[in-house]
Amino acid sequence: MNHSPDTLLVEQLKEGDLTAFDALFVKYYKMLCVNAYWFLQNEQEAKDLIQTFFMDIWDKKLYLQFDGDVKGYLHTAVKNRCLNYIKKQKLRYEHQEAFSNLQDETCQALPDVAPDYYKQLHTSLNNISGQKKMAIQMVYIQGKRYQEAAEEMGISINSFKTHLKRGLKLLRFAVNSKKY
């Protein structure tokens, strides 16, 4: 039976051979970094994404999914990770913009008190306790999606939405009740 070098690497990987993993890394790292850079247009982010991808290949045993065309699998997996990364960055940016707009709307109404407003906003956020505060931080500061944040908190999506809604209500009330 004629085996390609990649097929032999995969067989060795499935047996837990770390040298096969090293060989796979050396063979494909640069190519995958170039592919990731094409999507992300940032060299460090591309390298970080590929490094994490290779860690996942070993830690999560993604090599068990290698069937046939290893190069094609790696290329497709990196493309999908890049697209997901871009979506996550876009979502994070949109949430930060929404949070910033919330701040800007109040600051425009009271332009002379902008520094005090930001201080009050942060103080008010710090005074919110527990899951409400965590929900606001995860969505508006860390840029996480509701489902992702709910899973990290170990609660249902509906419970998460409730905590977020109540937290934002408390934050608005605290900021708007401040006498300037």
Image (tube, rainbow, N blue to C red):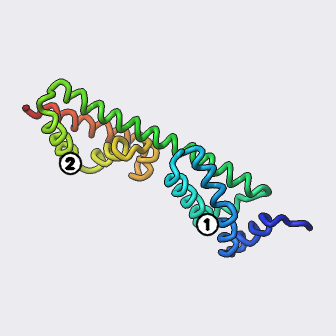
- Graded by Cα atoms within 10 Å as few (under 14), some (14 to 19) or many (20 or more), the crowding at tag 1 reads some
The image position of residue 76, as x and y in percent, is 68, 48
Q: Which residue lies furthest to the right in this view?
A: 1
Among numbered discs 1 and 2, the one appearing first in the sequence = 1
Amino acid type shown at disc 1: Trp
Which corner quadrant of the image does residue 52 belong to?
bottom right
Amino acid type shown at disc 2: Asn
Tell me if residue 121 comes above or below residue 4 in the rendering. above
Q: Residue at x 65, y 65 (%)?
A: 25
Question: Residue 126 bears which disc, if any?
Answer: 2
Label 1: element kind: helix
Res. 39 visible in picture = yes
Q: Residue at x 68, y 62 (%)?
A: 63
Res. 174 visible in picture = no
Q: Which of 147 and 28 is in front in this view?
A: 28
Question: Residue 58 bears which disc, if any?
Answer: 1
Q: Which residue is drawn at 32% across and 46% down?
A: 137
Which corner quadrant of the image does residue 113 belong to?
top left
Dividing the image into 4 quarters, which one contains the N terminus? bottom right
Which corner quadrant of the image does residue 49 belong to?
bottom right
The image position of residue 64, as x and y in percent, is 70, 62
Q: Which residue lies furthest to the left in this view?
A: 179
The image position of residue 18, as x and y in percent, is 65, 75
Q: Residue at x 54, y 45 (%)?
A: 40
Q: Which residue lies furthest to the top in this view?
A: 109
The image position of residue 17, as x and y in percent, is 69, 75
